[in-house]
Image (cartoon, rainbow, N blue to C red):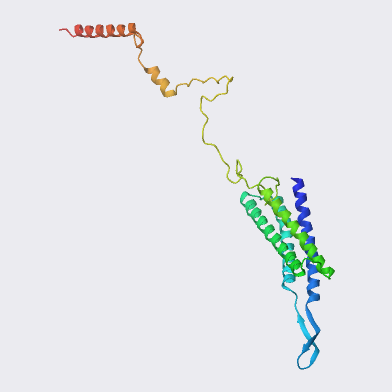
Amino acid sequence: MLALHIVLYVLLGTALVFAIVELGLTAYVASIWTGDRETYTWDPYQGYVYTTVHYSAPGILVFIIFSAVWTILVSAAALILPWFYTRKGAVTRKLNTFLGVSFIVVYFVTFVFWLACFADIEADLGGATSYSDYLNAVIAFAILLWLIFLALFIVAILAVSGVLFSDWAGYQSMKKRAVDPEQPQTSTVLPPAHDVPIGTTPAPVAASEPSGRDAEALHNQPPTSQTYSSSSPSGVASAELSGDSAVHHEKYDHRP
């Protein structure tokens, strides 16, 4: 994790410094190129004469200036935003996803910008070097910035894929986590009662005591003369005999 942070600091810091240098070099070359010059030209009525010609900077130099300013803003934002949100402690999954996708897209666009910059100049020069050392320096820094943002693009993809680990916002893994900190998952399924580990003695179950009303009802219940078990044949027979004798005794008690 610390190694990844150091790599990001080095790459983004270097890109910021190189972009500032590239901006200064390109602005100087564009200022030399732009202006009015006396040019010796042919005039069919006057012959060869000096005329004033206005030169403007080529479009590729203007595009390099734009790319340098864009790179300065991107490098500063990529350095400050992850550090700010991580220090503040407000890194959520949505924020990490938004910053991660934004960094990948911005790094790729910047990488394409610098590729187009030095490739266009080299195409105009025919693959050779320029007579101007300043223009050669512009080409060199454009190639270095292209390589730096290519490395940043690869590192950002590896970080959000979970190959490289970081706690910075935008560089955390986007894989689905077991427990989402924004939406904690709680299990509502109770474990089965018989699911007891092997070798563990079940805890004794305490007998439920009757409530006050049940105890009073049992206390007021009239006592029975005989108790028997319905599951025993002898108990059934004794119950039938006691019932017959009670009926016979009732008949004789009502005789006139």
Q: Quadrant of the C terminus?
A: top left
Q: Is residue 236 above or below residue 37?
A: above
Position of residue 197 measured from the top left corner of the image (x, y, whole percent): 57, 23
Position of residue 104 measured from the top left corner of the image (x, y, whole percent): 67, 55
Please give the name of the residue rendered at 78% of the width and 77% of the height, measured from the top-left corner.
34
Position of residue 248 measured from the top left corner of the image (x, y, whole percent): 22, 7
Please give the name of the residue rendered at 41% of the width and 24% of the height, measured from the top-left corner.
213
Residue 214 placement, left or right of 254: right
Q: Is residue 227 visible?
A: no
Q: Is residue 187 above or below residue 14?
A: above
Q: Quadrant of the N terminus?
A: top right
Q: Is residue 47 visible?
A: yes
Q: How many marks?
A: 0
Seen from the viewer's position, the closer of residues 46 and 214 is 46
Position of residue 159 measured from the top left corner of the image (x, y, whole percent): 69, 48
Seen from the viewer's position, the closer of residues 219 and 18 is 18
Please give the name of the residue rendered at 68% of the width and 48% of the height, measured from the top-left corner.
158
Q: Is residue 115 above or below residue 32?
A: above
The image quarter containing residue 153 is bottom right
Residue placed farthest to the bottom in the image?
A: 45
